[in-house]
Amino acid sequence: MQHKSNHFMKLAASLLLFSIIMGGCDDHESFILQEYPEVNVGLPPTIYVVKGVPVTLKQNNSSISDSDILYFESAGQFISCKVDRASEDSFTFTVPSGLDDGLYNVFIKQGLKRTQIGSVQIKFITKDIKINEGTTIYGVIETEDGSPLEGVVVSDGRICTVTDSNGVYQLESDKKHGVVFYSVPSGYEAEGNGVFPLIYDKLVMSGEFPEYHSFKLNKVDNQDNFKLLLFGDMHLAKRSNDLEQFRKFSEDVAKYQAQHPSEKIYAATLGDLSWDQHWSKGYDLSDFVNTANSNFKNLVLYNVIGNHDHDPNSIASNFDATNPFITNIAPAWYSFNIGAAHFIVIDDIDCEGYDGIKDRPYKEKLYGDQVEWLARDISYVDPSSPVYVLTHCPVFLQNADLPDNFYLYLNLNRGGPEILEILKGREVHFVTGHMHEQHTMLPTDIPAKDYGFPLYEHNIPAVCADWWYSGYYTPGVHVCTDGTPAGYAIFDFKGKEMTWSYKGTGRNEKELFRAYDMNNVDFTYALSEFKNLTDKNVIKEFERRYVTPYSDGKLKNKVLVNFWNWNSDCKIEAKTVDGQSLAISRCSAWDPLSILALTIPYWDRNELTSVPGTATRYRQHFFLIDCPDETSDIIITGTDKFGNVYSFEMRRPFAFNAAQYKVK
């Protein structure tokens, strides 16, 4: 058996293609080789044929001569053709005109004897490509009308090349990452599987064997101005009424699209499309594809892989961990262009520590060849083009006790410094998810200002808010653990300039904050109303976090404002309705609505013996307004970085209950 395997590899390695294009078979089987005493031929699983162009294959021992006849059989029907010429190491034939695309058993007739020499998939293509020595992946990139596209960047996940004037690319790839993908050029859109752009193929042939993968693009008019919707964590798992809540989210997206009919609108997810622990319970990444295609229309949706999109059953292999995502969604890393902007998608979830058990000990870091690939990819991008790096885990995180002060989370040995060195001198925006909350680092913040080039971090809240729990326990209230409403970010591009905003699902896109009259916020009642929560240590922690800070009149005659889209260039003002300015101070806090809608019912859902991880730290986008008394009506005005103003008049006393904040 070992001898046959080695002999097969030697024959397959000697396979020559002179005027054909070879590709992979759909069933992912290795090369088929049947060995006979008289006939010794290696057939590739697929032959891509240009009509009228002869096919030349390798043979050993001069077993086929120019007097022999080939037969192609399918469903009992045989079609024959003569061998045109043969030499000691090859033979040539022209595929007969009666053949269509399909799988055929191949026979050779020598005299009166007919012998099957293998099976092969025949596929007809329109272009004849001369393969360079060493090429293992190649093909054509063209428009829908067949016009070739020159200069399109193509990669195998490590090396890159560009298409020539005929739209042809060739890669000398080791096929390590199992994919070939291209970077959609500005002014074009990929063909799609519904909303999912077809920007890649999985490789199906091993080693040095060349395979053919081609792609088509559609020309679009004027991409100078466009909007990109950023969708944070979705965590769809067919539980907690999540699919119905997701439907309402997608309806909000459709409504937003309808309100901007003349604008190009694209979208990108930021990871955790699914929930790996629940794949075995009937909802996985293939189901997400169906859900997205059923709910989104007229949208191109790019996707990032999150920690919950990696295979929890993989063992010490990022290749295996990413395979479900690559099979169903997209490569683990790739790039694309829209208008003047270049977008880079990377995977900062390292699963080499996975051991196939439930705990899934991933590390938040770049792994493998991503840094090498990124350096090659960016070398094709105009230095003046802004770069947007989309990944799941934050690159920069906010310091716990220092407002508008950040630190490099993907630090040494995690890939962050390498990325920053490669992108040095460009305008760089990191766009991330994972945290289910909001923070924004500007180039003027610490440490961004120390890098010497425009550097941003946009951490986008979650579509699912708090894993769909608040909307499940308190219908109509969808809040993340920092109180940000479930929703999506809107990046509005005008040439190389970009402005951003955040839209809560079902809410006014101009809304910047939510306000609470703290005279009416007190969670002491929950301590006596818990039905399932009896563990004294857990109750004590609940009291410390959520009851004590808001009890005993500690915040009497104060209004708490959650300015969720806050950054250091925003402003907040408050005054009484008769014009008296009110003092405002920055603070860290737990969001009262999140406590009401999520924390109380979530902690009481069953008998807890440890503190849930749904909220682990204070958030810093909060402000306290000092009011003169209990009944003064006030006007709160927030202004974002771009001068957009949102005002809210609070008629006090202002009740605190879910109905006040519910999305109708």
Image (cartoon, helix red, strand yellow):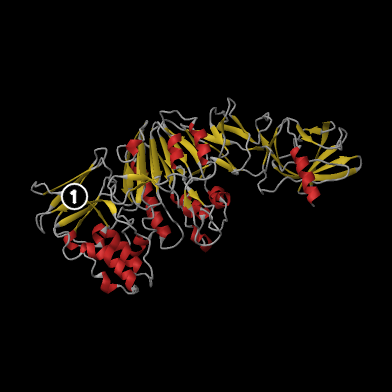
Left or right of 322: which side holds 524? Answer: left
Q: What element carries label 1?
A: strand
**Percent x, y for residue 231?**
40, 48
Q: Which residue is drawn at 45% across and 28% down?
A: 382
Whether residue 547 is situated above or below residue 180 in the rendered picture: below
Give x and y (percent) for residue 57: 77, 35
> Residue 428 appears at what percent x and percent y?
39, 36
Q: Residue 646 occupies which quadrant of the picture?
A: top left
Q: How many marks?
A: 1
The answer to whether 130 is drawn above or below residue 391 in the figure is above
Q: Please give left or right for residue 635 compared with residue 82 in the image.
A: left
Tag 1 residue: 585
Residue 89 visible to the viewer: yes
Q: In this view, does 317 lie to the left or right of 448?
A: right
Taking 635 as reference, is 378 above or below it?
above
Please, what is the three-letter code of the amino acid marked with disc 1?
Answer: Ser
Quadrant holding the C terminus: bottom left
